[in-house]
Amino acid sequence: MNFKSLLLSILLIVPFGLNAQTIENGVLTNCTGLSGEYTIPDGVKEIGEGAFFYSGVTKVHVPASVEVIGKSAFYMSYSLQSVDFAAGSKLKTVRDLAFSECTQLQQIELPASVDSLGANAFTFCDGLRKVTLPASLKRLCYGTFSSCVALTRIVVPPACKVIDEFAFGNCTGLSYADVQGADTISTKAFYHCSVLSTLKLPETLKAIGDSAFMRCEALATITLPASLERAGDKMFLRCPYFEGFTVAQGNAHFVAENGVLYSKDKTVLYECPQLYTADVFTVPATVKTIRPKAFFECNAVKGISLPATIEGIGLGALSNNGIAAFDFAGNDMYPVHDGMIYARLKSLDGLALLAAPCQSPKTDVVLLPGTVYIADYALAYSKNLNNVTMPENLKYVGPYAFYNDQALQNVTCYAVEAPQLLDNAFGDVPFNKVYLHIKPGSYNSYQAAGWLFLMGDDITGDYPYVDPATGLNAIAATGDAIAVSRRGDCVVVAAAQPIATVAVYDIAGRLVGAASAHGQNTATVQAVDNAGVRVMRVVFTSGKRATVKF
């Protein structure tokens, strides 16, 4: 049971009429049964925790003696319309949830003495239109004014050095914010301030957190001050009208070029604005690192060219955009296979699929055999992906790896033990339209791990991996090349050395034909449905193997 439900249950059991406000050691408590206008007695130093919880008070007069308004002091006082503070107020601290869900409260002018506002102090104050923050305020904590949907303007005084996460989150009516002296704006501090069009940042600002202005849909441009030293990942995530960055003259850490934000020496690409347009975005040769989600939602970027010397590609950096192909040959850290970028993982002794172009026309994906992890957003928003085949050593499917893959039809996984599905790995995928193909005997493992697809045919045969450069699998020796031709409903294979057996599979790994060659250099597989992509596995009499896709 959550905090709100527990308190409501207590109030239903204990009638309001039994409560009588008490003052003990300067702390006011037990005011939940009050209604109408109320004047707190002079001499009270603290309004206790939950003192007016769910009360019917409409107006409260706070004497100068009060120094602390406790946690949840006026929580859910739905009738409270105004709070005024006596001249010479000594109020220093407003604690967590103090005025949360006071939905009728329309304005509040906090005394100049206040230096601390707790987490969610005014969250869900739906009617709050005007707030005057005191000059002495040092910090806005988590969610201080979150979901104050009627708030239209805010001025954060110079003494307030930190604006914490979600401080103004979901303030959907906020159009003007003047931050006068902060040095830190934290992650999602202004999340979903959807009409925020004027944002003034101070020359004291040193750090902006990840997605600090996420879903600030009315912001078109931003000028980063000369003082800024640290920038978070995708600060303007889901800002569909964001045109780009400018950087104030004299900034020693950042530079903007055509609206794209880089480090001063252009070794780090931080963020590409959502409205950037390019048939091919050429990442400068100086860039060594692309930060997470750098090109996320850049739908007008149709292709990207990466330098061969790239050393770091962040999670989701190349996902959910207009890119149909990567112009990148790969390097030691980031091998490329079938147009997709992998990363070598020392920690897991294998490969991670890092990114696939989400606008690729390809319908089928077969992962490299050494893949142990499908990274965050790696195949998310893949417009045309119908079938994916995963190797037996796969361990994890990362957060949002296949998110919103609406065309997905078949998932074939060779792992006997179900890989772990992390947060929303298949989020927004129609589970009732996708078939899962696994090895016999693996059903319970996959069911327990949350692979909730329809059950398809069992897997038979070996993993259908093909090296696109050679047509051979990873264990085939040099010189073991084979030739395959279709002849009606037959498939003929020829090789430079004696063949023992041949097997043909469809792209989902289902056996569709087989033959024995008895040591001959040719073999014919009869009665094969030759429509669509097929994979042939050849075993030579020497014990070597080769695989080719045709």
Image: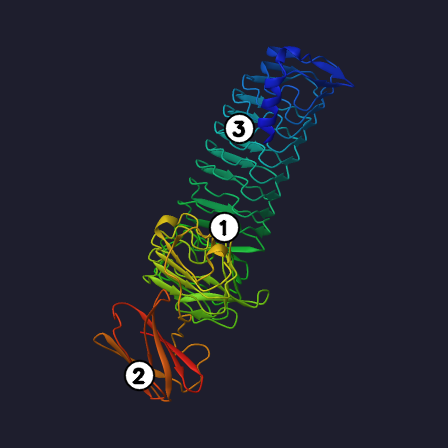
Q: Is residue 41 above or below residue 326?
A: above
Amino acid at pointer 1:
Lys
- Provide the secondary structure element on which disc 1 rests: loop
- Residues at badges 3 and 2 in contact (C-beta under 8 Å)? no
Q: Is residue 505 above or below residue 470?
A: above
Q: Give x and y (percent) for residue 240.
A: 40, 45
Mark 1 Cα within 10 Å, few/some/many (few <14, many 20+)? many
Mark 3 Cα within 10 Å, few/some/many (few <14, many 20+)? many
Instruction: Return the residue at label 1.
Output: 234
Camera-side residue of 295 and 479: 479
Instruction: Return the residue at label 2.
Output: 523
Amino acid at pointer 2:
Ala
Amino acid at pointer 3:
Phe
Q: How many marks?
A: 3
| Residue 84 figure quarter | top right
Instruction: Return the residue at label 3.
Output: 124
Is any part of residue 93 visible from this angle?
yes
The quarter of the image holding the C terminus is: bottom left
Q: Is residue 354 above or below residue 2?
A: below
Camera-side residue of 15 and 516: 516
Real-space Cα separation, disc 1 to disc 3, in angstroms: 27 Å
